[in-house]
Image: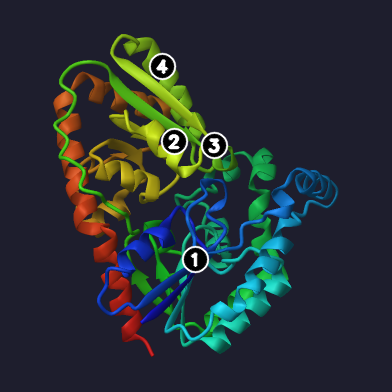
Amino acid sequence: MRILLIGDYSGLHSALKKGLIQHPKVKEVVLLGDGDKFKNLQVDLSIRPQWTSSRWGTFFRKAIHKVFRWDIAEVEKGWRAQQHWKQLKNFDVVQLINDRPIQTIAPWEKRLIKQLLTQNKKMFLLSCGIDVHGFHYLTTHQEELSLFQPLFANPKLKRQYAYVDVYRQKGVIQTQQLILAHCQGIIASDMDYVNPNKQHPKYLGLIPHPVIIPNYPLIEGPESGKLCIFLGINRGNYHQKGIAFFEAALQQIEQRYSDQIDIIIAEQLPYQAYQLAQQRATIVLDQVFSKDQGYNALEAMAQGKVVFTGANDEFLAHYKLQAEEVCMEAKPDVTYLVEKLSYLIENRAVIAKIGQRAQQFVREVHDCNTVANQYVNLWNSKN
């Protein structure tokens, strides 16, 4: 099989590629993308903006965006994708990271998708990140736990959510309709994407997020010394991840346990630098408004860290887990977060047990080789 992966989100396609190249039925895997923006992940065919990221390009880009609220880097991405088009033929499977995988202007995105459909065999749509379906579902089901809840509670945050307005655009909706009309199916990448898609006739189910898992040693747990608590901040999704709740909780925790903890706050780091900053941590604060774990949380769990992240009742039921068995559910409640952090600091043996179970869970469910096998089986089952 020859596999073409278009776009990336939180390293999902990067990790999936690692698993796919180990699979005996897979001959070649090609990943086209922009490196997931500032994370700068490795890709085979890059559409990362260069001119619009240069000194003068950035000046014009900011000026145009200020006046027209439009990012000219989208045009450069489309142009760079088009330059690779002769290399994107005759693949057995094309998988799109979502319904706007190239993130260029709508007419160009639609044309590129049409080309992919005509010069390859099967196409699958991965529901990952915000897409047309998810946007419509979550904005009409405001009771659903999602990254939109801060906006529903405080409409003044509208500017911080302006990036999702593209999914209201006619051209973007038409591209999504084109994909759904011709693809073999929709795959959810975690529990956050199940409800928006499960009623669609082409929904194929959930395949867990793949994670590259080196041979991490089993964690024994911190018996003495200071505990290290890590918080990573990306200003682009600060509100969507509920970072303010973590910051407020850490202020109280620092006052209570200053002699027992170290706190590391890392902001807007590329992927490799983020990983280095997180290495010392025993406890990792990930995100509040989610049902399931993304790549950063899963990678930390694979290292035996205790992670505050998405782990609601739907997640627990799906994986047949108990509350706090493999991670700590993060809630938009400062008092709750302080209580749970305090409990861990005062009961270090619990940290070791959760960390060990977290490692085992990620190895069993999310290992990129295991997940790649699930993808290959699903792709091959559809004509």
Disc 1 residue type (three-letter)? Ile
Badge 2 density bin: few <14, some 14–19, many ≥20, Cα 10 Å:
some
- Residue 97 image label: 1
Q: Quadrant of the N terminus?
A: bottom left
Residue occupying image coordinates x 78% and y 51%: 69
Circle 2 is placed at which residue position?
332
Q: Nearer the viewer, mark 3 or mark 2?
A: 3
Quick check: marks 3 and 2 in contact, CB under 8 Å? Answer: no
Disc 1 to disc 2, C-alpha distance: 28 Å
* Mark 1 vs 2: CB contact within 8 A: no
Look at the numbered discs 4 and 3 and tell me whether their residues touch, using CB distance below 8 Å: no
Earlier residue among tags 1 and 4: 1
Q: Amino acid at mark 2?
A: Pro
> Residue 160's spot in the image, x, y percent?
65, 43
Question: What label sits on residue 268 in the rendered view?
Answer: 3
User: In the image, residue 121 lies at what x, y percent?
Assistant: 46, 88
- Residue 115 lies, in percent from the top left, at 61, 83
Residue matched to label 4:
252
| In this view, 323 is above or below 45 | above
Q: Badge 3: how crowded within 10 Å, few (<14), some, or many (20+)?
A: some
**Comparing labels 1 and 4, the label whose residue is closer to the camera:** 1
Labels 1 and 2: the sequence-earlier one: 1
Picture mark count: 4
Q: In terms of sequence position, does the residue under pointer 3 or pointer 1 come before the other?
A: 1
Q: Residue at x 83, y 45 (%)?
A: 63
Callout 2: SS? loop
Q: Nearer the viewer, mark 3 or mark 1?
A: 3
Disc number for residue 68:
none
The answer to which of marks 4 and 3 sits earlier in the sequence is: 4
Callout 4 amino acid? Gln
- Tell me: 282 left or right of 179: left
